[in-house]
Image (cartoon, helix red, strand yellow):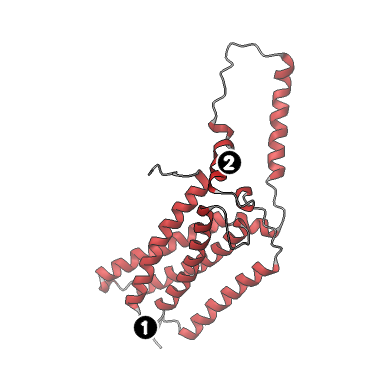
Amino acid sequence: MRAGRIPNMTLSRILRSHFVLLIAAALSLPVTANAHDGHKNDMSDAEMAQMEMHGAPSAVREPSTVGIAEPASATATTPLTAERALEAKIAENRITSAGDLFGRLHPIAAHFPIALLLMAAIAEFFLFMRPAWGLETTVRFLVSGGALGAASAAVFGWFAGGWRLEDRSETLALHRWNGTAIAAVAIVATWLAFRPGSRMALRFVIAVLAVALVIQGYHGGEMVFGPNHLGLE
């Protein structure tokens, strides 16, 4: 056996063990993920847009009060009211369960597979252009790491978005199922990366993953910043 090559049987056991651990962790925890209220309430796209429009008080310019004398009572109670509002917001954002924690980890976990899998696509492109560079091991590392990260992000995403098969929000539905498909296809890409004689199939799968990741990032931005967040329409 050549140095640096992992047997297919060992790779299969590693992937299978990681997948089983993720599923076991998901099923062993209470499915009471209290992540984003818009996701948990299964809002429609219009409702989510309205929530984004009215849920950001910092975006609304308050009328200027320069030169206007305020009553002493109002001046005295304003700091106290603001402090209580801050305390209420902190209390509202406290973690309530393990499922809630997992849902909040989704935005953090999602960045790693995006970076690793896109870098795998770039490395595979350079390998196609310059085979002498010998980037096969690099591609295997990036794809396998991206697959593990994508599987974790997908599980966390289900906690964040709620464990249901249908959503009134089209954006949330596309984000949910596209992310789940990315995790599954990334595992297939890992299997192909360690399988001799499957370079062409691996390149096709990595290209599909790269396109799906760009789409996934766009839908994630739509959910955070609202419809047409890039101003393309």
**Measured along the vertical axis of the image, is residue 40 above or below residue 210?**
above
Q: Contact, CB < 8 Å: mark 2 with mark 1?
A: no
At x 49%, y 70%, the residue is 184
Q: Which residue is mark 1?
A: 196
Image quarter hosting the N terminus: bottom left
Packing grade of label 2 (10 A; few <14, some 14-19, many >=20) is: some
208 horizontally vs 223: left or right: left
Q: Earlier in the sequence, mark 2 or mark 1?
A: 2
At x 72%, y 38%, the residue is 88
Q: Which residue is mark 2?
A: 51
19 horizontally vs 187: left or right: right
Q: Where residue 185 sits in the image (x, y, percent)? A: 45, 70
Q: In the figure, residue 24 lies in which quadrant?
A: bottom right
Q: Where residue 110 sits in the image (x, y, percent)? A: 51, 58
At x 54%, y 81%, the residue is 13
Q: Where residue 128 sits in the image (x, y, percent)? A: 27, 70
At x 48%, y 67%, the residue is 181
110 horizontally vs 230: left or right: right
Q: Secondary structure at mark 2?
A: helix
What amino acid is labelled 1 in the image? Pro
Is label 2 or label 1 in front? 2
Q: Nearer the viewer, residue 162 or 47?
A: 47
Q: Name the mark on residue 85.
A: none
**Measured along the vertical axis of the image, is residue 19 above or below residue 45?**
below
Q: Secondary structure at mark 1?
A: loop
Q: Where residue 5 sits in the image (x, y, percent)? A: 41, 81
What amino acid is labelled 2 in the image? Met
Q: Nearer the viewer, residue 104 or 42?
A: 42
Image quarter hosting the C terminus: top left
